[in-house]
Amino acid sequence: MIVIYHNPESPTSKECLKILETSKINHKVIEYQDLTLDEKKLTEIISYLQIHPIQLVRKESSVWKNNFQHLLDDGHTFTDDEIIQIMIAYPSTIVRPIVIDGKKAVVGRPPEAIKKIIL
């Protein structure tokens, strides 16, 4: 079953969900507000995406801008573990939507990117 980590307020996320619904693929919707990812699950998702944790951070998020961006600007380097802990503590910093099919995943930006794993 395909899982979509979805933000119902995001036009991009809505478009991804629409693609799933019109393709009539069996899927489960997890709204990001209900997101309770632990370190193991988030690390697993990152490995499915085949990216570094920093690539999953919404850098336009006010939480990121107000609490962490200035540290990067001052030359601080976050470890992967630190980034993961930030995303766990502040789920709004996680890029979404994320669509997962088994051990394959993709960020739905642009929405058509999800076709890579649903076709």
Image (cartoon, rainbow, N blue to C red):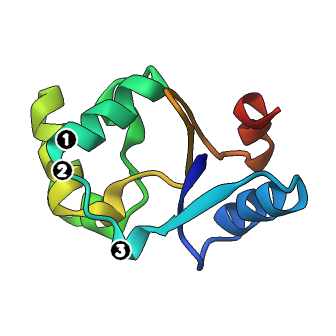
Residue 86's x, y, as percent? 16, 51
**Residue type beneath disc 2:** Asp
**Residue type beneath disc 1:** Ile
**Disc 3 to disc 2, C-alpha distance:** 13 Å
**Disc 1 to disc 2, C-alpha distance:** 9 Å
Residue 8 higher or lower than 113, as above or below: below
Mark 2 — residue?
38
- The residue positioned 78% from the left and 51% from the top of the image is 25
Along the horizontal axis of the image, is 65 left or right of 26? left
Q: Which mark is residue 84?
A: 1
Tags 3 and 1 in contact by the CB under 8 Å rule? Answer: no
- Rendering quarter of residue 41: top left
Q: Which mark is residue 44?
A: none
Mark 3 — residue?
34
- The residue positioned 15% from the left and 60% from the top of the image is 89
The kind of secondary structure element at disc 3 is helix
Residue 22's x, y, as percent? 89, 60
Label 1 or label 2, whichever lies nearer to me, is 2
Front residue (pair 101, 70): 101
Tags 1 and 2 in contact by the CB under 8 Å rule? Answer: no
- The residue positioned 83% from the left and 32% from the top of the image is 119
Front residue (pair 117, 11): 117
